[in-house]
Image (cartoon, rainbow, N blue to C red):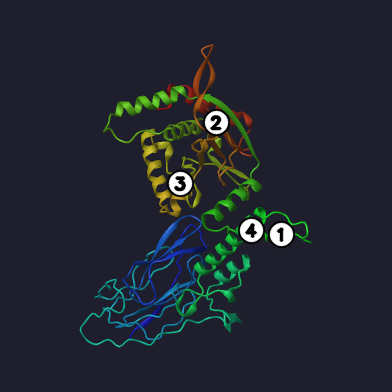
């Protein structure tokens, strides 16, 4: 006899308490194997696929795409050891399609897996077990006849009103859809749902929002094109467009919280200096030319600047520290875990190069390239986004010269780098066109005074202008 097991959102580590459902990877009625990914979620740290520790038939899902669930909340239920999909699974308020499961024979599944993620795991597996082949329920596993179960209606909250000219309930399951409709003043009673049995989905509300905005723009254009009529007693004003509201959650919410905390807790100060980067650019070109066409990856400017930062932090360890406010102590950290700001489609993230003080420029560059690719594809783990001790922010890639960075709490400093571009510069007593960059350092004034911060920044500028200065530390 099949046993229905409930799989809850596991602890994803790093103190995370909730996650947003980005994409379901299975439907109600699907057969899943042990440790098969069933849902893609986004936390405040990263986007991850969550595997299910049970094998069997999915009988219900909880949470629609775009909704947030706390750790420990039910994700889905699985009928373990079922020979066919249950005829009457519990209605799921989260099933994106609202469809019921179809019955079909399936192979016997095992009861569970080991510790798949932090904080959960199932019991020891049986002595013998066979894994479920991930095939759709409804495909017969043997020529024996299959009895199809009756369809299960989707539970719809009662909300009376006129639906397309008729009295009846509003076919909306998701609270997210209701909230979105309220925010944009969309009357759900006038929408025709595209889901099963007329279920109103988020796509239906989004379409209605676009139609309303287009109608408002068309009305504005018409009003502007028509000549003013003197006899008209009053002028009809175009309806104002509704303001767009974007939830602060996931990565963007985590960044907002961290930046707000940094501004409220850290008494920061900023100093900056212009530096002649001509020799640095020449040294980089020479290094890459010496490696030859197949001599390995090229050394980037960011990698050279990162190596300069590790050398500067060795001279000024005050800036590689944090403040323990409870103990009223400055904690100087033994190693440099260098974070670097990376802009992605999901927002700003700061991957961390571990033990950067033990690496050369080539090794740092290779790790930066690897982490950047993971950031672009949304595959960075929480551990790769935490634990930094100093951050390097190259905002010059956006074509700007200067900035006053906000410290990445709980670190003590951040170095900002503007674009490197030709500018007039006095070189050897003569006016010349040189490659100039602006460097800015924002630091926690509790850990050091301006003399230390200025010394750090000046050393970085000296290494940029004369890369040979680094030879003393190599």
Secondary structure, mark 4, is loop
Q: From mark 4 to mark 2, how far is it between C-alphas? A: 38 Å
The answer to the question of whether label 2 and label 3 lie on touching residues, with beta carbons closer than 8 A, is: no
Residue 439, label in figure: 2
Measured from the top left, where is residue 354 in percent x and y? 42, 44
Residue 347, label in figure: none
Measured from the top left, where is residue 83 in percent x and y? 29, 83
Measured from the top left, where is residue 463 in percent x and y? 48, 25
Is 189 on the left or on the right of 13, as rendered?
Answer: right
Q: Residues within 10 Å of mark 3 (few under 14, many from 20)?
A: many
Q: From mark 3 to mark 1, how far is it between C-alphas? A: 50 Å
Q: From mark 1 to mark 2, how far is it between C-alphas? A: 51 Å
Secondary structure, mark 3, is loop
For the C terminus, give its image quadrant.
top left
Which callout, 3 or 1, points to the residue nearer the camera?
Answer: 1
Which callout, 1 or 2, points to the residue nearer the camera?
Answer: 1
Which callout, 4 or 2, points to the residue nearer the camera?
Answer: 4
Secondary structure, mark 1, is loop
Q: Which residue is mark 4?
A: 243
The answer to the question of whether label 4 and label 1 lie on touching residues, with beta carbons closer than 8 A, is: no
Q: From mark 4 to mark 3, how far is it between C-alphas? A: 33 Å
Q: Which residue is mark 1?
A: 237
Is 265 on the left or on the right of 113, as rendered?
Answer: right
Q: Residues within 10 Å of mark 1 (few under 14, many from 20)?
A: few
Q: Which residue is mark 3?
A: 351
First of labels 4, 2 by sequence position: 4
First of labels 4, 3 by sequence position: 4
Q: Residues within 10 Å of mark 4 (few under 14, many from 20)?
A: few
- Vertical placement of 13 versus 169: above or below? above
């Amino acid at each position: 006899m099949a046993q229905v097991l409930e799989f809850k959102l596991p602890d994803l580590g790093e103190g995370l308490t909730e996650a947003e459902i980005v994409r379901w990877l299975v439907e109600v009625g699907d057969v899943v194997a042990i440790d098969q990914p069933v849902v893609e979620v986004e936390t405040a740290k990263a986007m991850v696929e969550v595997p299910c520790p049970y094998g069997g038939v999915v009988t219900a899902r909880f949470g629609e795409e775009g909704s947030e669930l706390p750790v420990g909340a039910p994700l889905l239920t699985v009928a373990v050891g079922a020979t066919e999909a249950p005829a009457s699974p519990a209605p799921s308020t989260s099933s994106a399609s609202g469809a019921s499961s179809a019955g079909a024979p399936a192979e016997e599944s095992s009861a569970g897996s080991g510790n798949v993620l932090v904080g959960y795991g199932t019991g020891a597996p049986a002595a013998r077990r066979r894994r479920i082949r991930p095939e759709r329920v409804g495909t017969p596993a043997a020529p024996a006849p299959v009895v199809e179960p009756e369809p299960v209606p989707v539970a719809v909250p009662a909300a009376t009103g006129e639906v397309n000219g008729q009295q009846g309930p509003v076919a909306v399951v998701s609270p997210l859809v209701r909230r979105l409709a309220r925010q944009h003043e969309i009357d759900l009673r006038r929408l025709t749902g595209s889901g099963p049995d007329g279920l109103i989905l988020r796509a239906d509300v989004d379409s209605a929002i676009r139609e309303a905005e287009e109608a408002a723009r068309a009305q504005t254009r018409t009003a502007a094109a028509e000549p003013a009529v003197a006899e008209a007693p009053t002028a009809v004003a175009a309806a104002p467009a509704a303001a767009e509201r974007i939830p602060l959650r996931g990565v963007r919410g985590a960044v907002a919280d961290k930046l707000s905390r940094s501004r409220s807790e850290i008494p920061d100060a900023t100093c900056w200096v212009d530096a002649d980067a001509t020799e640095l650019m020449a040294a980089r070109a020479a290094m890459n030319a010496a490696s030859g066409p197949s001599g390995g990856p090229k050394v980037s400017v960011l990698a050279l600047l990162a190596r300069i930062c590790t050398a500067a932090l060795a001279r000024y360890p005050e800036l590689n520290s944090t403040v323990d406010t409870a103990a009223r102590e400055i904690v100087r950290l033994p190693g440099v875990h260098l974070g670097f700001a990376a802009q992605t489609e999901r927002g700003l993230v700061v991957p961390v190069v571990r033990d950067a003080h033990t690496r050369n420029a080539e090794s740092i560059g290779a790790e930066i390239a690897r982490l950047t690719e993971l950031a672009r594809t949304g595959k960075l783990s929480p551990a790769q986004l935490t634990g930094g001790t100093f951050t390097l922010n190259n905002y010059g890639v956006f074509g700007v010269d200067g900035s006053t960075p906000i410290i990445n709490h709980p670190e003590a400093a951040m170095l900002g780098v503007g674009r490197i571009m030709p500018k007039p510069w006095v070189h050897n007593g003569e006016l010349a066109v040189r490659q100039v960059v602006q460097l800015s350092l924002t630091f926690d004034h509790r850990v050091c005074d301006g003399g230390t911060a200025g010394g750090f920044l000046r050393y970085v500028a000296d290494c940029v202008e004369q890369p040979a200065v680094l030879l003393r530390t190599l």
